[in-house]
Image: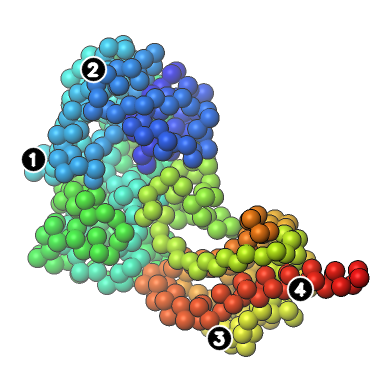
Amino acid sequence: MKIAVAGATGYIGGRLVPRLLAEGHEVVCLARNPSKLDDRPWRDDVSVELCDVTNEEQVVAALADCDVAYYLVHSMGSTSDFADTDRIAATNFRTGAAKNDLQRIVYLGGLGSGGGLSSHLSSRQEVGQILADGETPVTELRAAVVIGSGSVSFEMLRYLTEVLPIMVTPRWVKTLCQPIAIRDVVATLVAAAAESGDDDHIYEIGGPEVVSYEEMMRAYARVAGLPRRVIVPVPVLTPRLSSLWIGLVTPLPVGVARPLVDSLRNEVTVAGPPIPAHLGVEPIPLEDSIARALDRDDTLDMPSRWSDASTSPARAFSWDPDWAGGTLLLDRQEVESEASASDLYWAFTRIGGAVGYYVHDWAWRVRGIIDILVGGVGLRRGRRHPEEVRLHDTIDFWRVSAVERDRHLQLAAEMKVPGDAWLEWTITPSANGNKLVQTAYFRPRGLLGRLYWYAMLPAHRMIFGRMAQRIAATAANRVTSSADEQR
């Protein structure tokens, strides 16, 4: 089918599009800012239409010749009166679908029933009703917390649980919800496009477990390898105070956090089966979905290297907001050098072992002794070869996690640290020859990991800057020595 996706630049849309392409559909992405799609790995496989859903003419034109359309648009966080904006957008989309005789609209909304729904959940369900009031059949999927790196609700869960070993929380931590993995949301959306007939459908979708937000935090801590969290609910924290606290502790914008926090007082569970059987999706358990969201490759998953969305929809990607994917701390040093790429590569790939670390080797030896005392491997493994490196080689308390001759080396730390650490060097061409970029990355585990990183900052300043300079100087001296020998 020819399928339009409104909201392709968003979290769900960015993971849905490659799945639709894999199913053989022709995909049209509707975007208010088409340039936001330029970095997608699938950009050349789709067509893109300029479309602001608050503009009826643009919607009608963008949906021309389409069979099915996904409506994944939500104005929360982009305007103070998001509900009114969503009404206008949904009405325009309903009109555009009718004028183009679409077979179906598939809409992802929010769970919740009864009176007293938050403004966020009320708006989600009102949008579904507006779409269903038109001529085009609508399949509305209602979900609660989506578990996947990059989803707002999951990132809020991640940061609160990782940063705070002791949490004084509002009463909403006892509220029940039915979280669902992003992979199951995407699979259900894909299946819903194939529905036929003229009837509207509302399907409530969720994972196999009903849990409280407190239980969800404890599950995250278990999967992430964090100590058991102490959670103390108190009655005095209002949704407004909670959202301000979340804005302080996490990098999520307060404008996004506030309507979400306000919704946490509403129980959001599925009344029937987690996902209707005819859609053919078997949802995975909560801890499995958390593990998928936290899963990392052997190499460092920096934003420019996220796995393709079609194979791992749970992970963060380069187009996600800066707060997606958890905390990654770094120390970056850049040195201009007239040395060749091969000489720079030679200089940093001989690190460790008998050569040492170029700067303050005594400090590295002390760090190795400390590592042994706490049960680590220390520096005693040395190197397989004094100058050659291969993928998965051990170098003292490091392991080679990525290597590309004359360009790149990445070492993953196997020392005892409260988190995951990497040290890497990359060579890039520059106006004066080459630039050596040295980066130390650290993904902290819990509050202890963050305290460890900041406690080590003085040592980092003492070592890392001079290390990059010495590596570049060693490479330059190798060139000089070779020239002297030829003379």
Residue 484 falls left or right of residue 377:
right
Amino acid beneath label 4: Asn
Percent from the top left, x then y, of residue 54?
Answer: 23, 28
Name which residue lies at 18% across and 20% down. 133
- Asked whether disc 4 touches disc 2, contact meaning CB atoms under 8 Å apart, the reply is no
Of callouts 3 and 4, the N-terminal one: 3
Q: Which residue is mark 4?
A: 477
Residue 204 falls left or right of residue 266:
right
Percent from the top left, x then y, of residue 396?
Answer: 67, 76
Of callouts 2 and 1, the N-terminal one: 2
Residue 126, placed above or below residue 469: above
Amino acid beneath label 2: Thr
Q: Nearer the viewer, mark 2 or mark 1?
A: 2
Q: CA separation, marks 2 and 1?
A: 29 Å
Of callouts 4 and 2, the N-terminal one: 2
Q: Which residue is mark 2?
A: 95
Q: Nearer the viewer, residue 215 or 161?
A: 161
Residue 125, placed above or below residue 369: above
Q: CA separation, marks 3 and 1?
A: 59 Å
- Asked whether disc 3 touches disc 2, contact meaning CB atoms under 8 Å apart, the reply is no
Q: Count up the numbered dots.
A: 4
Q: Which residue is mark 1?
A: 115
Q: Secondary structure at mark 3?
A: helix
Q: CA separation, marks 3 and 2?
A: 68 Å
Amino acid beneath label 3: Ile
Of callouts 1 and 4, the N-terminal one: 1
Q: Which residue is mark 3?
A: 370
Look at the image and tell me whether residue 256 can be seen.
Answer: yes
Percent from the top left, x then y, of residue 268?
Answer: 21, 45
Q: Nearer the viewer, mark 4 or mark 2?
A: 4
Neighbours of disc 4 within 10 Å: few (<14), some (14-19), many (20+): some
